[in-house]
Every structure is written in C-alpha cells, then in structure tokens.
Image (cartoon, rainbow, N blue to C red):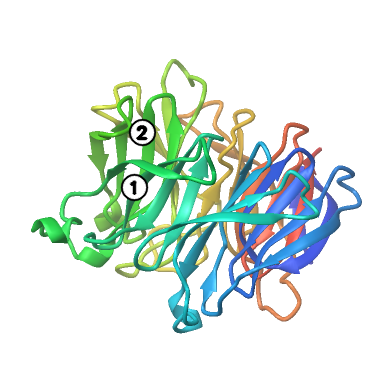
Amino acid sequence: MAKINGLREIAYVDCKGGGQIEVSDGIAYVGHTEGPEATTIIDIKDPASPKVLETVMCAHGGVHAHKVRVHDGIMLTNYESIGYAGEPDAGFQAGLNIYDVSDPAKPKHINQWVTQGKGVHRFTYDGRYAYLSATVEGFTNRIVVIMDLADPMNPQEVGRWWWPGQWTAGGEEPNIPAEHIMCHHPIRMGDKLYVSYWHAGWAILDISDMSNPTCLSRMSWTKTTGVPTHTCLPIPFPLRGMDVMLVADEDVAKTKPSGPAHLWMVNVSDVENPMPFASFQLDGLDTGTPMPVQTGCHQPVEVVRSTEIPVTWFENGLRVVDIADPHAPKEVASFVPDAPEGFDKPLGNDVFQDEAGIIYLIDRRRGLHLLERI
C-alpha cells in the first residue's frame, strides 16, 4: 500500500520511467531513463486529467535521452551512451539535442551539438546558456561545459572548467582514482556555478567571465561517506542570515559499505570558505550501518518555491523537507508509492514543483505521480 502524509495524489500517468521531469507552460516533459523512448510530452493544464501529447524516440539503440530542459519553446535533451544497454548503434553521435516545441504536440528536431565520448549527462538551461556535464576530447570523464544557445541553430561553447587531473591530453594526473572524478551537473545562481562532482566532491565557480570560469572553493566528504555528490542547490533567499547551499548525495556507486546518502546544509555566505553545518536523514534509517544502494537520498527540486523542498529518496519515495530552520531541517510531508507493476519497489528519481505548488514525482522505472500539499 502506498504511504502518504501531508500530500494528496491528484493523478498518475502510466509512462516509462524517467531521469528528469520539467514543467513549462502547462506541459510536462519527461526524459526517460531507458530507450527507445527519449521524451514524453504531457498536457497537464488540467492536473487531474493529464494527456500524453507525443513521445519522442531515440534515433539509436544503446543510448538514452533521460534529461530534458525547456525554455521559450526550445527543448534540450541529452544524448548519451549507457553501458548497461550495450554498444550504441552505428552512426550514434553523443551530445545535446535541440528541439522546437512551440507546438508541444509536434516537437521538431532542429539541431544537435555533438561532442566526444559518452556524451552529455545532466544539465541546466536558463533560456540563453546551457550548463552541461559533458565528455569532451582530451579529458577523462565529464567536465563543465557552458554553451551559448542564443541561436539554437548555431550553439557555441563559451567556457569550460574541469577538476584538476582531468585534462589528460595536457599531461594532468589525478590525485584520486580517475573514475571518481566527473562532473554531475552545474546549477547557476547569479555569477556563480554550483557544481556537483561525484566522488571528487563539489565546487563553486565564478563565471562572471564565462570564457574563463574560476574555482572559488572545492570540498569533499565522500571518502568518509562512500557515496557520490549528486546535486549542489543554492537557495535563492537567505536562511537565518546565511546564504545556504543544499548538497544531495546519491545513494549509488558506493566506494565502500556505508549508510544511506544524506542531504547536507552548507553555509556559502563566504563562497571561498564554505562551511557544512547540518544534515538531514530519514527517521529510522541507520546511518552507521551499511545499507543497500538506492535506500537514501537522490535529488532535490531545483526550482525552489519556498523553504519546503521536495526531495526524491529512491525506494523511500518523495520527502518534503522544511529548511526554514536550516540548523534543524525536518520532514513535513512524504509519499511512498506502491512499486510499479513488474517491479519490486518504487524508485523516486526526479521531482519538479510548478508555480501552483503541484509536485511532479517521476519513478526511475515507471510512472509519473502528480501531488499537492494538504
């Protein structure tokens, strides 16, 4: 039986599982974790009666397009090879796909920015610039790439940044295992990029000159926790006089037996000297005992509407965490759905909250839930 507290389920869309959910102008866009489906486009103007408009398909096997962002009628999706699906079909070119969705029921592929290696993973987009986690020639694993999409038919790279040790073509050597160093995704606020960097930790970059991003600070606790850093989310308003960043670790790819991944609070009032000062974990999860992967934290909402932050917690569904007192974040609502048909458990993967407060929870394996606070 589904477990629900402080929320009400409005509707359910039975679609393939997703890696990201974005809502723009009454339309939901779901990027799918596995092909051949790439992006499902859903009319949610009546949230109680969602209607699937179209599903965009991957052009190749062995790849996925599980991330999606939309702004002013332009939809961006990643295009990435995925090891568990085998080798991609001949002709596959990794990168960023660009669509015209001015008519969401009739998406038109208009361009692709092509890169080397596996391709683009997670990214953010502000309507002008895209901030990518991408593999590029000469570097080990994914780095930060800033793309200018003022002209979607002619995207231009304007800047890049990498963790020291990634530029193998330049003779750099990492001081931790190379496979641990990869950008997960950057999030911009003002002239800063807040960048998660997997087992290497995280970094805050100054991008006032986008052609030359510079590192203001770096930090890691993954040697202690054993879990990688997934998201660095700057909060767009002060809390108790502090500028705060949430850091979500992802409960996968553990480097050692460990407890479940956490949500962390970091004081970034002085971005050159950030200070972690609090954390959040679900009641009942034993943080000192090794636990299976996908038990703990995954991803917070990235468009922050209030101090109540919806966060996906893998098999523990959705948790709404109130950070009004940042020293003592607390759970105020939750939703753990039934396991999707054909699976043994739910896996809350990504979440979006629209201006009306409706929360969209996509399961990694199957299904989109529409929820509201009560």
Circle 1 sits in a helix, a strand or a loop, which is it? strand
Q: Residue at x 56, y 56 (%)?
A: 67
Is 75 in front, or is 252? 75
N-terminal of the two: label 1 or label 2?
A: 1
Kind of residue at disc 2: Phe
Q: Residue at x 75, y 35 (%)?
A: 357
Q: Is residue 106 visible?
A: yes
Q: Say if 201 sits above or below 206 in the image.
A: below
Foreground disc of the pair 1, 2: 1
Outermost residue to the bottom? 86
Which residue is label 2 attached to? 277
Relative to residue 20, is residue 203 drawn left or right? Answer: left
Q: Residue at x 63, y 63 (%)?
A: 18
Q: Residue 328's spot in the image, x, y percent?
A: 49, 33
Q: Residue 201's spot in the image, x, y percent?
A: 29, 49
Q: Say if 72 sits above or below 133 in the image.
A: above
Q: Say if 126 sits above or below 80 in the image.
A: above
Is 371 in front, or is 116? 116
